[in-house]
Image (cartoon, grey):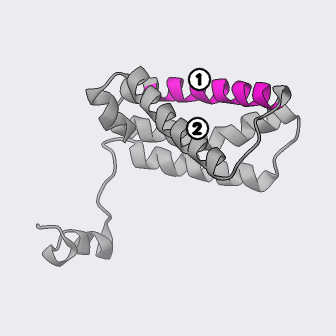
Amino acid sequence: MAKQVTDVAPVLVVLGLRYAVAAVALVTVCIATRQQRPGRRQAAVAVGLGVTQAAVLLLETYGVARTSATNAGLLISLTVVLTPVVDGLWARSWLPPRYFVAAVLAVVGVALLVSGDGVHAPAGATGWCWRQPACGRGT
C-alpha cells in the first residue's frame, strides 16, 4: 500500500498523515482510559523510541517509493526479519538458533518470490487448475 500512496503523495506527507492518525487514536485511548501524564523519564524514552521508529519508517518508505513493488516487498520482509537481530545485538542477548533457521527460510522464500520475472503461476496439477475458468483464470 505504501508504494501506491507514495506514487500520488510525497513520502513526508504520507508519514505525517500516518503519525497524525496514530496520535489521534493514542490521545483518544489515553483520555478514555484516564491515563496519567507520563513522567520525565517515560516521556524521554517515548520520544527516543518515536524518533527511532520515525527514522526507520522514513528510510523504509523512501526505499519503497524508489523501487518496484516487488523489491518493496523484499525490503519490508527483510525489515521484519532483521529487527529481532538488531534488538538482540542492542540488548546483547543472542536469539535461539531456530530463529536463524526460520529467518533464512523466510529470506529464501521472499527471494524466490521476487527473483527473475517475479511470481510465476504454479506448475503441475495446481498450474492446470490455475489456468482454468473455474479457478478464476482463462487459458
Element under disc 1: helix
Q: Nearer the viewer, residue 28 or 20?
A: 28
Q: Residue furthest left?
A: 139
Query: What stretch of residues is rendered in magenta?
Result: 42-61
How far from the left and from the top, in percent, is residue 64? 41, 30
Q: Residue at left 42%, top 49%? A: 113
Q: Tell me which corner region of the image, top left, top right, bottom left or bottom right, holds residue 40.
A: top right
What amino acid type is highlighted by mark number 1? Answer: Ala
Above/below status of 31 relative to 121: above
Q: Nearer the viewer, mark 2 or mark 1?
A: 1
SS for callout 2: helix
Name the mark on residue 100: none
> Where does residue 58 sit, x and y in percent of width and height?
51, 24
Instruction: Give the crowd class for mark 2: few <14, some 14-19, many >=20 residues within 10 Å.
Output: few
Which is more toward the observer, 95 or 97? 95
In terms of secondary structure, what is the magenta stretch mainly?
helix
In the image, 23 versus 65, the foreground residue is 23
- The span from disc 2 to disc 1 (Cα, nearest Å) is 13 Å
The numbered mark, 2 or 1, whose residue comes first in the sequence reads 1
Rendering quarter of residue 138:
bottom left
Three-letter amino acid code of the residue under disc 2: Thr
Q: Is residue 55 magenta?
A: yes
Which of the numbered marks, if any, corresponds to residue 79?
2
Q: Is residue 12 on the magenta stretch?
A: no
Q: Position of residue 74 (x, y in %)?
A: 47, 39
As drawn, 131 above or below 26: below
Q: Residue at x 36, y 42 (%)?
A: 1
Q: How many residues crowd mark 1 within 10 Å: few (<14), some (14–19), many (20+)?
A: few
Q: Which mark is residue 55?
A: 1
Q: Residue at x 73, y 45 (%)?
A: 35
Residue drawn at (65%, 38%) of the image: 82
| 51 shown above or below 111 | above
